Every structure is written in structure tokens, then in C-alpha cells.
Image (spheres, grey):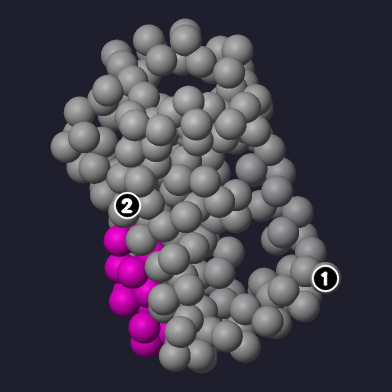
Amino acid sequence: MLRKLYDWTLSFSDSQYSLWVLGFIAFIESSFFPIPPHILMIPVIIAAPSRAFLIASIVTIGSVSGGAFGYFIGSQLFNSIGLPILEFYHKIESFELFKQQFNAQGHWAVLIAGLTPFPYKVITITAGLTGMSFATFMLWSMIARATIFFVIAGLLWKFGYPIREFIEKRLGLMFTLFCIILVLGFIMVKVL
């Protein structure tokens, strides 16, 4: 199944709609969708390395815009939309303590969540819910998301084919490592 998803993603990477799809996925991932755009970004850049930095720009804009929507969910729609999302990630019980800590050091949370497998959407909603300055939130979101997406794009642009070969030979291993990192991110959140 993983191989089919990877091959399908590569096949659509040459499509005229690939950039729109990536931008849309980056947007919804930052506010509620569970699959990160990094996964789709990799085969699209590998298929078109000359567009690596354009792709990183589109994914960054989509992700930061989605982060603004997540902020809106937290600030305006928490009870009807935000609360169920946080329940999905099992964050309700520690939310009050987290809210206090977040208000004190929220810019670091945005930066760390934007750069790591930590679920960025939890931070976007929390920033809105706790009333973090929107300008501060957007600044740190832009820094974090641009950094991670442009680093990925730069590596793929520079070492594209060998990385493609590495990924294709070890697709199962790469997916397993990604899942382990994601789970560790969730565990880290639970411990905080």
C-alpha cells in the first residue's frame, strides 16, 4: 500500500495541479489534517528538482496560512471545532497547565512545533485559544515553516536522484522512521 501511495504521488507530481494540491494539503495540515505536507513534497521535488524552491515557497505559504486558520479556530471556534481536535490528540487533561506555560513561552512552542514532527496544528489552535499575539505567532510560524521546508527542498535539489534512489530502496524503513519520530513527538507533548 505504501509503495502504491508513493508511486501515485510521483505520478501526480508532473500534473498541472501538483502545486495546488501541495499548497492545499499544507494549509489543512496546519489546522486539522493529520498527514504532513513533507511526505508529498519529497516526491514532487524529486520529480521536478528545478522547481524545488518554488514548491517550498508554496508549501510554506499554505502551511502558514493554515496556521492562521488554526489560530482562528482556537480564538473563535474552540468549543465547536478546536475542542474536538484537541480531544483527538488527547490533550484536554493537560491543557490548562499547557495554556499557562504557552503564554509565557509561546514563541518557542511555535518555533519547535514548526521545525519538528510535533503536531503543528495543536500549537496553531493553542496560540489562538490562549490569545498569543497574532503578529508574534505569524512571525515565528513563518520562520519555522520556511526553515524546515526550504531545508528539505535544498537537500532534495542538491542530492535529488541519490535521495530518490535511497527512498525508493528503503521506502518501508523511511516510513517506519517517520512514524517513530511522529510517535516520539506525541510522547514529548504528553510529557510536557
Tell me the quarter of the image containing the N terminus.
Answer: bottom right
Residue at x 33%, y 38% (from the top left corner): 72
- Give the magenta part as a residue range: 49-61
Amino acid under disc 1: Met
In this view of the protein, can residue 156 be seen by the observer? no
Question: Percent from the top left, x then y, of residue 135?
Answer: 16, 37
What is the total number of numbered labels drawn onto the structure image?
2
Q: Looking at the image, is 156 positioned above or below residue 81? A: below
Judge whether residue 64 can be spotted in this image. yes
The residue to which callout 1 is attached is: 1
Viewer-proximal residue, 81 or 129? 81
The percent coordinates of residue 87 (x first, y second) are: 62, 27
Q: Could you tell me which residue is drawn at 60 percent across and 55 percent down?
A: 35
Q: Within 10 Å of the Cα at label 1, are there few (<14), some (14-19), or many (20+) other Cα atoms?
A: few
Mark 1–mark 2 CB contact (< 8 Å): no
Say which residue appears at 40% left-offset and 33% top-offset: 77
Disc number at residue 64? Answer: 2
Q: Give the amino acid type for the residue marked by disc 2 in the picture.
A: Val
**Alpha-carbon distance for marks 1 and 2?**
30 Å
